[in-house]
Amino acid sequence: MNCNVLIVDDSPILRTAIKKVAKLAGMEEDHIFEAGNGAEALTLLETIWIDLVLLDLNMPVMDGEQFAVELRKRPDLNDVTVVVVSTESNKERLDHMRELGAVESLHKPFEPEDLRRLISCHLGVTQ
């Protein structure tokens, strides 16, 4: 299955860790993309089709919430699945992300198996 995943997080260390788990979930490395904030992610989405966005909320330049608002303004990107992967625990903010289209959230720090399950579930990749 050729699915593309975009990891949006301002921490290069966390992007590397998430990428490692995505590969363990059956993703091929050349189908895993990275962005350091929401603005970089939107720019990337102009040139590459992404099936699943793993989105941090607390980032400089453009945070995850601003990214989700901008993403939903673009009809050509309404099919992109967004999962929040963040330290955010504010229920109202997470509920707002669901209203903006996020299908699930995973709290950092997370167990690698939980992230692997999430990727497999939303992309249907086999392990």
Image (spheres, grey):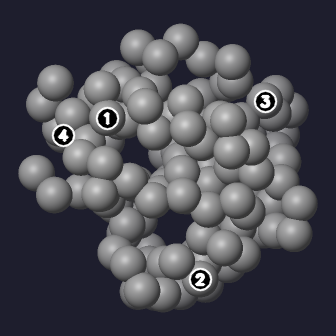
The residue labelled by disc 1 is 23
The residue labelled by disc 2 is 43
- Which of pointers 3 and 4 lies earlier in the amino acid sequence? 3
Q: CA distance from mark 2 to mark 3?
A: 24 Å
Given the image, on which type of amino acid does mark 2 rest? Answer: Thr
SS for dot 3: loop
Image side of residue 59 versus residue 33, left or right: right
Q: CA distance from mark 1 to mark 4?
A: 14 Å
Foreground disc of the pair 3, 1:
1
Given the image, on which type of amino acid does mark 1 rest? Answer: Lys
- Tell me which residue sits at (74%, 43%) in the image: 11
Q: CA distance from mark 1 to mark 2?
A: 24 Å
SS for dot 2: helix
The residue labelled by disc 4 is 124
SS for dot 4: loop
Foreground disc of the pair 1, 4:
1
Mark 4 is surrounded, within 10 Å at the Cα level, by few (under 14), some (14 to 19) or many (20 or more) other residues, namely some
Foreground disc of the pair 2, 3:
2
Q: x and y percent of residue 119 in the render?
A: 35, 36
Q: Nearer the viewer, residue 97 or 2?
A: 2
- Which of pointers 3 and 1 lies earlier in the amino acid sequence? 1
Q: x and y percent of residue 49 in the render?
A: 34, 75
Location of residue 8 (image quadrant): bottom right
Given the image, on which type of amino acid does mark 4 rest? Answer: Gly
Mark 1 is surrounded, within 10 Å at the Cα level, by few (under 14), some (14 to 19) or many (20 or more) other residues, namely some
Q: CA distance from mark 4 to mark 2?
A: 26 Å
